[in-house]
Image (spheres, grey):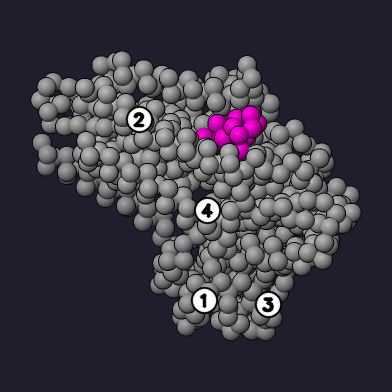
Amino acid sequence: MKKRKIDISNLQPLIALFLMAVAMTILSENFATKDNLFNVARQISVNVCISVGMTMVILTGGIDLSVGSILAFTGAIAAGLFKNGIEMQGMNLYIGMTLFGVIWIALAAGAFLGWFNGFMITKFKVPPFVATLAMLTIARGLTMLYTKGFPITQLGDQFNYIGTGWFLGMPMPVWISIFVVSLAAFFMNKTRTGRYIYAIGGNERAALLSGIKVNKVKVVVYMIAGMLCAIAGLLVTARLDSAQPNAGGGYELDSIAAVVIGGTSLSGGKGSIIGTVIGAGIIGVLNNGLVLLNVSPFWQQVIKGFVILLAVVIDKFNTKGE
Amino acid sequence: MKSKKLILCIIGLLIISQFIFSCSKSNNNVKKIAVVISTLNNPWFVVLGETAKKRAVELGYETVIFDSQNNPSKETEHFDNIIASGYKAILFNPTDAKGSVANVKAAKKAGIPVFCMDREIDANDVAVAQILSDNYSGCVLLGQYFVKKLNGKGNYVELLGLVGDNNTWNRSKGFHSVVDNYPDLKMVAQQTGEFDRNKAMEVMESMLQAHQNIDAVFCGNDAMAMGAYQAVRAAGKEGEIMVFGFDGAADVVDAIREGKIEATGMQFPKTMAKTAAEYADKYINGERNFQQKIPVAVELVTKENVGNYVAFGKAE
């Protein structure tokens, strides 16, 4: 019974995505081409990575507003270290960085900022909205300090391969997001910690009383979210061949939209990773389609807002009916 | 236990505040100049602000940069603080032509002269002088070069900046004042890249799918030109589609040298910032005779003359 319910809530956004894709195919002959579909897949891969983490956070009943800033910070750190290495003039020492080295450092930096979010939320009982709002400006400020306000560019083909390369006929960012999604779906459905995340969001007190280490799980969730932002940061940086100090502004809204459109409840406990991926797909198709149809930029914003509303209203309507 | 922690916290805060206080305590004999910049989230404005500060310091002033974060109400707070703490002049890059007028009026009322840099305010009698980048004429030059490169015919797309920003439309209008006279030059799409490299790349990727035969793209700033170039390159159309930018940013100057980007409009933030600082110094020393608007010409940078330029200005 419970299994069936999850399937139904997954179906809703999928139908919406399908209808949109059909409509776009009719309206624009350039939509359903192989090139363009890869294009859309590549464009949503950044949002998918962020939104997978956001889904977990929202499932616990929290929220993460700091994703865009963490993305910018980790991207800048990776680009800066890869390009310039670490120079210690006092000791006449220069440490160069390999690509794998900077990837690990970026992931660790993302995990650390996420840990700090989780620590503030669980240890000092700062509401997630406030703790991550603070991190939004802290991480942005750190990015500005590190880059001095200038983009770090010309990173070379090796680094850019992460964002612009192809592997077995598919763009690298698409592979990376498929990997992230499969891992996350497995984690959420097949591991004990994954089930605990649902339990905490469903009823935190009950979870606590049944012996789940709620705080520990929450910290882990924010750390995962931070690491996924780091992956997204590497993707954005590699795609642009540039770490922009103002990268990722407004990404928290895109990813919350993807999560909500995908049928995850903002009050926690109910939702799925796959739903979020479909939500990100809907936003991606919309962004791409409105440009293909050359809709005026003013109207695009209005239309996007209404689509978010519509998705949530339909979802609410359906859950009430059950 | 709890109270012990609290006391420790308070002591910590006191120590920190002491530190900050002692840092910001200023020598009363030194005259102070404030630099208020619309946003430090963009290298172009960082250069504008840092150059203004540097020149003011050279002229013997203590100088502080304030970041308005593109937010007119934050700008108002900065002005309140500046007026309250006895600055002698403000070198000002407004967030909004209309929204910033009240701030400048307040400073004038308090006897603090304001010198606008790069962006203008919608009033001719409140700032002492306005040293402005001539966006419109710069884009007329770019438009003329654009027509020449395309031999007056072809399909092009335009990437606008933020659609709520004056400069976006000044640049677009300047460009179209020339290009629209050529009926064989067709604009097949006009979209916004929000002055952002990533956004511009994604929009360009989609436009490349929608239109198979684009010959050129005109971008309202250099960040968008770099983004558009990345999209063109990824689509394997490098060399087929000409990219035009505006600003004179470092990577675009390099890209023009390498033939990746056709042209940009070079603005001179350093010249504007230095002039503003020098005017402020003259004002403080008694000079009162200033022209209200001083336009700083934007120069066309192409492969032919790129050797004369570096990022944000002329090669020395």
In-front residue for pair B4/A321: A321
Q: In which chain is the residue bearing label 4?
A: A
Residue at image mark 1: B101
Alpha carbon distance from label 2 to label 1: 53 Å
Q: Is residue A112 above or below residue B135?
A: above
Circle 1 packing at 10 Å, graded few (<14), some (14-19), many (20+), is some
Mark 3 or mark 2: which is in front? 2
Q: In this view, does A112 lie above or below B228?
A: above
Q: Are labels 4 and 1 on one chain?
A: no
Alpha carbon distance from label 2 to label 4: 26 Å
In-front residue for pair A291/A58: A291
Residue at image mark 2: A10
Question: Which SS type dominates the magenta stretch?
Answer: helix
- Count all numbered tags in the image, as a single digit: 4
Can residue A37 be found in the magenta stretch? Answer: yes
Check disc 4 and give the amino acid type.
Gln
Check disc 3 and give the amino acid type.
Lys
**Image location of residue A220, percent across then percent down:** 31, 25
Tell me which segment is drawn in magenta: A31-44
